[in-house]
Image: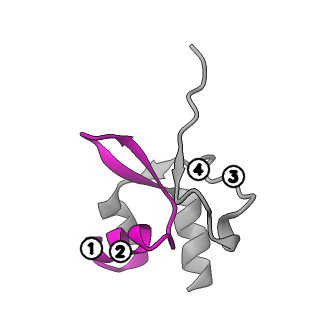
Amino acid sequence: MGHKVMAIYPKQLPTAFAGQDLFGEGLVSVGQAAKFLGICRQSVYNLMDNGKLPFVVLNRFRGRRIPKAALRIFAESM
């Protein structure tokens, strides 16, 4: 079975994420990301919608997932 490449959003990544291996550390849910960052889930959605936090869409039933590496990079830039 071949490796499936996931699309990451936003298509134009913020500079801090460009060239980084965002998938190497795995993915987390919105709730897990909120807990890691110490913010509410709606704030995580706002960050994603504003293009400040990269995410992938697995499918319409499982929703968005955030690369762990992106969370680490984002937290270091806060």
Q: Which residue lies furthest to the top in this view?
A: 1
Q: What residue type is labelled 3?
A: Asp
Quadrant assignment, res 70 = bottom right
Frontmost of labels 1 and 4 is 1
Do residues under tags 4 and 3 come within 8 Å of each other at their CB atoms? no
Sequence-wise, which precedes: disc 1 or disc 4?
Answer: 4
Q: From mark 1 to mark 3, how far is it between C-alphas?
A: 26 Å
Q: Where is residue 69 in the image (x, y as percent from the top left)?
A: 59, 60
SS type, badge 2: helix
State the residue at coordinates (52%, 60%): 10
Q: From mark 4 to mark 3, how far is it between C-alphas?
A: 8 Å
Q: Residue 21 carries which label?
A: 3
State the residue at coordinates (57%, 68%): 72
**Residue for badge 4:** 25
Q: Is-magenta flag for residue 42?
A: yes
With 52 as the anchor, is 28 left or right in this view? left
Sequence-wise, which precedes: disc 4 or disc 2?
Answer: 4
Q: From mark 1 to mark 2, how far is it between C-alphas?
A: 6 Å
Frontmost of labels 4 and 3 is 3
SS type, badge 4: loop
**Residue for badge 2:** 46
State the residue at coordinates (37%, 79%): 38
Highlighted magenta segment, given as a residue range: 37-66
**Residue for badge 1:** 42
Q: Is-magenta flag for residue 50?
A: yes
Q: From mark 1 to mark 4, how far is it between C-alphas?
A: 24 Å
Q: From mark 3 to mark 2, how far is it between C-alphas?
A: 23 Å
Q: Which amino acid does label 2 sit on?
A: Asn
Residue 35 showing in the rendered view: no
